[in-house]
Amino acid sequence: MSAVLSNFYLKIQVFMTRENIQNEIFSLFREHFEIEDPGLDDDLKDVHGFDSIDAIELFIELEKTLHINLDQEIKKDAMLHIRTVNQICDYVEQFLPREDAVSPCAMSN
Amino acid sequence: MDRRVVITAEASITPIGNTKEQIVKSLAEGVSGVKPLREDEFLSEFVHSKVFGTVDYPIDYDFDRKYRKTMGPVAFYACQVVKELLAKAGLDQEFISSGRLGVAFGSIHGSPLMQREIYKNLFDKTSTRFGSVRAVNYLKSMVHTTAVNITRMFQITGRVISSSTACTTSSQSIGFGYEMVKFGLQDAMICGGADEYDTTTVAIFDNLLACSTAYNDRPHLTPRPFDADRDGLVVGEGSGAILLEEYEFAKKRGANIIGEVVGFACNNNGGDLILPSLEGISTVLRVGLDSAGIGPESIDFISAHATGTKMGDVLEAQAIERVYGNAALVTGLKSYTGHTMAACGVIETILTLYMMEKGFVAPTLHLDQVDPRCEGINHAQQLFEKPIRLASIQNFAFGGVNTSLFVKAFDS
């Protein structure tokens, strides 16, 4: 496994706790959507005016930031059901390596 | 149905100011808005023409992010003038969202800056993911981005016309808006156009050898419409909007009426897409007069398209002489602003309305020695204090599109 890829998996493995994910999402909201520290259960549309255009942009940013590829059907489903930061965290978590999973880094060693 | 159509508000961002006071002062004192071309780390270092009709004053945009997120620079210009327009007009929100107010607004090709952003991502060899081509950038760049960002920001639900016919974009906006109101399809129309700072436009005209290059060290002396020493056009940036209303509706609500649109014509040369046509221009002027139901002798003032190109000015002067003779005063207002592209028709209409209100005709700047081929018409070479009762604003575009618009001082 290349060093670059190893570092990437290592980064996800080490940093992507629930809190890390939340912080990444807060950072994206701040930088790209001018939304400062939304409440975890705020309805993003009603409280912050976060609309479908923003949601599409958020997918792109999540894919870039977390180095994940989100399937089109999954995105469509998410567009229908996700309303809060907590739900975004739940959504993202399922695409990241679990904490108890064996590190791809460790496998290569 | 054939209704009177009046102008009840105007707003603009131009190289010579964004308030009536600044613009009138520039016209009266002969101040040019042409400046050195700004560096953009793109084409500015390569183009030969180093002059530009420049908006170099701060603009207090106060748009919420939910609107900004779909706006490129051209939409900022467009929405800002419409914000000011609606503030002046005093229309209530119920009417604005009634479906009886429409928008006719365009730009020559949306936002070139955002288009470059799309292409940059698309052709980035390090990225193989089409997801990098962002939908939101399309909304910022698309050809009707000005019109629909206006509708979104102000919750306008009426008709949308977004012409994109190069230099006739906003004169078409006004003309088509006029026809919407005149024939009862809408009660009011916001009409205008905008174009952002962009060196690709400069490059296109530069490559056609149509840009001014001889005055790079003296930007304020070019363009020079009809002058023997003219050497081409100067690209510029800006935006303008006017509000057209059906007369009875405007009167009933106590609107401040600043002029009346009485005629409009649009045609095509039916031939070359670049070279102007004497026949095409002459015809659009005649058809416009017919649509206004007036004779050529009624016109006091002609705002010529007059870009300062070698052939365009000659053919326009010949067409004016052929149709109007040499009675009406003729001014090339681009000598003040440069060629603001999609915005030129509406900006020149607004400048004409200001001169109409103040009772003067500004001269064509730098018209020191009239090109003999442009003689035969009544060039304004100095400021004339005289009332303008009926004015013709004419514009001609790449693609062979021509427009003539007729504006009258309001008489109840």
Image (tube, rainbow, N blue to C red):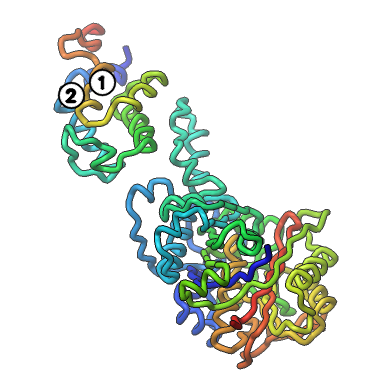
What's the mark number on residue A15?
2
Say whether residue A18 is visible: yes
Task: Look at the numbered disc 1 and give the secondary structure of its residue.
Answer: helix
> In front of the other: label 1 or label 2?
2
Q: For the point 56% across and 52% down, which residue is it?
A: B159
Q: Residues within 10 Å of mark 2 (few under 14, many from 20)?
A: few
Above or below residue A99? Residue B80 is below
* Disc 1/disc 2 C-alpha distance (Å): 12 Å
Q: Residue at x 50, y 75 (%)?
A: B16
Where is residue B397 shown, x and y percent of the image?
A: 70, 60
Residue A7: which numbered mark, if any? 1
Label pair 1/2, CB-CB below 8 angstroms = no
Query: Quadrant where the N terminus of chain B lies?
Result: bottom right
Q: Residue furthest bottom?
A: B385
Looking at the picture, which amino acid does disc 2 mark? Phe
Check disc 1: other Cα within 10 Å, few if <14, some if 14-19, many if 20+. Answer: some
